[in-house]
Image (cartoon, rainbow, N blue to C red):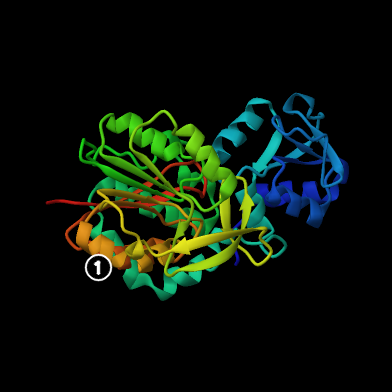
Amino acid sequence: MQFSVSEDLSAWVEEFSNNPARRFVFGCNKWGAEIHEEFGLAGFIDDVASETTYCGVPVIRSNEIPHGALVISAVVGVRPMTAKRKLLELNVNAVDYFDFYRANAGRLTEISYWQGAQLDKTDNSQRYQELKGALSDSESVRTLDAVLQFRESYELSHMNGFTDRQKDQYFESFLTLGPESVFYDVGAFDGETSVQFARRAVVYKEIHVFEPIASTYEKAKKNLSSFPNVHFHQFGLGAEYGEFKFESNGSASRPSDSGNELCVIKPLDSVQLTEPTFIKVDIEGAEMDFLHGASKTLEKAKPTLAIACYHNPEHIWSIFDFASKALPTHAVYLRHYTEGFAETDLFFVPTE
């Protein structure tokens, strides 16, 4: 991909390239590691990392940044604007990762969730228009425009107005929770979303927690131990029954041939449980598999559905296309819950 780059940014990148002793990255993560591999850094800046070295170079705190340092903020997923503001408040000569990527698009790997985004938008322009036309409020339209512009342009300014509000994720004002609510938490991780549901609903009928990874399954059981009527299921939900190797990486677990944990996956349509009134789904890119295995349940129960749509460029329209056929009378909303590329969700809400 080719991007337009300002003269000031080009000059900054040239200065960064020519001064190895002044090169620093803010954030010990895979994006910073790639910059180090490609350019070579004098060090990483991280206020929460426990290690003193990363990728073989020193890790320092933000109060230790040397005078004259040239810093790239590699905070990209959740709070990139907050990170950039922090560096500017420290009077650090810094650019954000997205600016740096635009100036070095041929040398850095495209963000995996955005790979092929521009081509997908071109090839499926009619599907994007259908999605936009189906959205139920102006905030959904604003969110769609901003998310698409951000991933196509790599310009962080498109995220102006968005904040990290993951504590409110899945629980918007257009949703109704009550004593007859049956909540399915698909991809529950440590159970935090179910905790939020229980606290917000106060009185509910049942919570069903689906988590295939043993360690996080146990965390979810512990975190939800004080709440009533919670049912735990140590398997994932997908298109068909099977056993798959999973690789766990922080809050993200996904099938991988190199994974070290064997997990069971079942289609929701094969599981005999109380019908859901509200299903939340975030399973690291396997959301379409879930839908294929849940179509009969969706058509019969007609629940509210809140589902992640940011792990793959086409998911924002393909999930809409599939779910809107299974739930044709539901209102459709789109919300984004961070300052960066992570946590965009589609909602399908009953209107009857």
Q: Is residue 228 above or below residue 324?
A: above
Secondary structure of the residue carrying tag 1 is helix
Looking at the image, the residue that sits furthest to the top is 63
Please name the amino acid that badge 1 sits on: Lys
How many numbered markers are drawn?
A: 1
Q: Position of residue 113 (x, y in %)?
A: 54, 59
Would residue 25 be found to the left or right of residue 174 on screen?
A: right
Looking at the image, the residue that sits furthest to the left is 352
The residue labelled by disc 1 is 325
Q: Residue at x 33, y 70 (%)?
A: 127
Q: Residue at x 54, y 41 (%)?
A: 218
> Which residue is nearer to you in this view: 342 or 152?
342
Would residue 252 be found to the left or right of residue 331 on screen?
A: right
Residue 109 is drawn in which quadrant?
bottom right
Residue 172 is drawn in which quadrant?
top left
Res 302 seen here? yes
Quadrant into which the N terminus falls: bottom right
Q: Position of residue 261 (x, y in %)?
A: 63, 57
> Which residue is nearer to you in this view: 46 or 285?
285
Q: Position of residue 176 (x, y in %)?
A: 22, 39
Query: Mark 1 packing: few (<14 Cα in 10 Å), some, or many (20+)?
Result: few
Q: Is residue 230 above or below residue 300?
A: above
Q: Residue at x 48, y 38 (%)?
A: 221
Res 161 seen here? no
Q: Position of residue 222 (x, y in %)?
A: 50, 34
Q: Residue at x 34, y 29 (%)?
A: 199
